[in-house]
Amino acid sequence: MEGRSEGVQLRSDKIPAPVPAPAIQRTRLQVWFIRVCSSILIWTCFVQLVAVSELWQPRLLAGLSNRLIGFTKVSFQVEEVPLSPPLLPPRNYTSNGFLKVSCNGGLNQMRAAICDMVTVARLLNLTLVVPELDKTSFWADPSDFEDIFDVKHFIDSLRDEVRIVRRLPKRFNRKYGYQPFEMPPVSWSNEKYYLKQILPLFDKYKVIHFNRTDTRLANNGIPLYLQKLRCRVNFQALKFTPEIEALGYKLVRILQGKGPFLALHLRYEMDMLAFSGCTHGCSKEEAEELKRLRYAFPWWREKEIVSEEKRSQGLCPLTPEEAALVLQALGFDKDTQIYIASGEIYGGWRRLAALRTAFPQIVKKEMLLDPEELRQFQNHSSQMAALDFMVSIASNIFVPTYDGNMARLVEGHRRYLGFKNTTQLDRRKLVELLDLHQNGTLLWDEFSVRVRLAHEKKMGQPTRRIVIADKPKEEDYFYANPQECLCERTSCDDLLLSGNSTTIQ
């Protein structure tokens, strides 16, 4: 008996004490509460995941999301947006310092300068600060970089080549007492100048501010990879803002809806006439006004100018009256749709009378768009020029009356897009022919034939860029004919055969 009692006692030691009923209920409630909360959390996350998948991958979980939408009785109308290409990995390099640049000039002069400065930053392994745009020139445009260009796209699309930041680190700000070293690089310099003269300065200053950037990189004698980078910045990285692109594309659609069109870059504007000293066709009062304006700007160094002498050398933009005669001689009839890509024409609509008589289908952006659509761009000459740039690129034929920065960059862009017809007017030859025709020496038929013959090989066909040693100002401009970027191979001989030509349609 004692043994049996002892065994019973041992078994009783292993039996747990009974748990009170209220405690059991509390435990069950806690477990139930945790399960309910977990279910709600998981369901919420699932719904959010499906919503995100509908925005970014519309076909992802399509059947399941449709059943979910049907169950909840909620409908969404999401426009499918193509995914952006994945970003290339950033280039891994040790930065030698920060390059700050202030661009000078109009939109296209600054555009070329930005391409050059990205290239210089890549060459010297620098960190580039988003460029500052000119606000003090004749146009006094207050636009910042991000008002004209898509700054995020600019930074992201070049991350595999050069590091770009929106602003200098605080330790380099003037308000903290730091004074960056300012200088203008020497014009038309090649990579040896930047490697030997500029790069050592970063060891001392860490930040260098280029306060002028126009034509600071040579046209020729630059390594191929740097030339191709200049093109990549120009043709791919420098996208206009969505607002500018939307309105520019609208302009193009309106014009294309009416048929083929010619974009005429009529550079008969006050700043160009004052700068060049070209007053042909102006009244005496207008000539005096332009002269006073030239003297008002100290950086327009050439003051005393003989207008007719410059015109005879082909250094003046064509007048609207001359442009009308040239277009007629080239074979364009009165039904040709012409878009005037320019700012305010000096003399207004009065000076366009002869051109409008010859070509009644003349339009400007102000005639095609509602004033409210243009309001946000008014008093911002560079943003307005961006619209003209887009239309000029898209036009069937582009005819500039002066070989300024816009004319040359549009020409290069059109070459890049497949050698689209760009009629490069030989103004020196044209002035001679125009004067002979207008004084009665050269009849119309002969005038027209000679104008056409003079431009047979000046319509944007593939051609080699002219190199003039030690005379960079006189050689062909890189951005007008970036031949290194116009074919996949390093040699473009097959594009330069005589059989490749563009004719007037």
Image (cartoon, grey):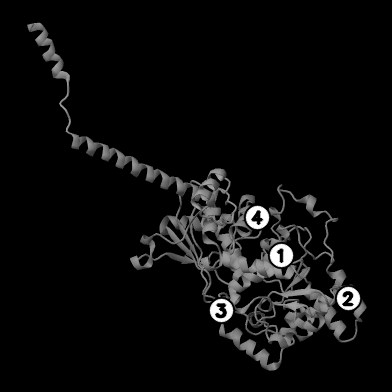
| Residue 231 rendering spot, x and y as whole percentages | 64, 56
- Label 3 environment density (alpha carbons within 10 Å; few <14, some 14–19, many ≥20): some
Reading the image, the residue beneath label 2 is: 448
Q: Dot 2 lies on which element? A: helix
Query: Which circle, 4 or 3, is nearer the viewer?
Result: 3
Q: Are marks 2 and 4 in contact (CB under 8 Å)?
A: no
The quadrant holding residue 256 is bottom right
Are discs 3 and 1 less than 8 Å apart at CB?
no
Task: Name the quarter where the C terminus is drawn.
Answer: bottom right
Type of residue at label 4?
Gly
Tell me, yes or no, if residue 108 can be seen here. Answer: no
**Where in the figure is residue 69, as x and y percent of width and height?**
52, 50
First reached walking from the N terminus: tag 1 or tag 2:
1
Return the disc, 3 or 1, that comes first in the chain's sequence.
3
Residue 323, x across and y down, in percent: 78, 78
Q: Tell which circle, 2 or 4, labels the residue nearer the N-terminal end.
A: 4
Please give the name of the residue rendered at 59% of the width and 64% of the height, measured from the top-left corner.
240
Disc 1 from disc 4: Cα separation: 31 Å
State the mark number for residue 221. 4
State how far apart marks 4 and 3 are (Cα): 40 Å
Residue position for label 3: 379
Is disc 3 placed on a helix, strand or loop?
loop
Q: Nearer the viewer, residue 103 or 383?
A: 383
Q: Are marks 3 and 2 in contact (CB under 8 Å)?
A: no
22 with respect to 316 (left or right): left
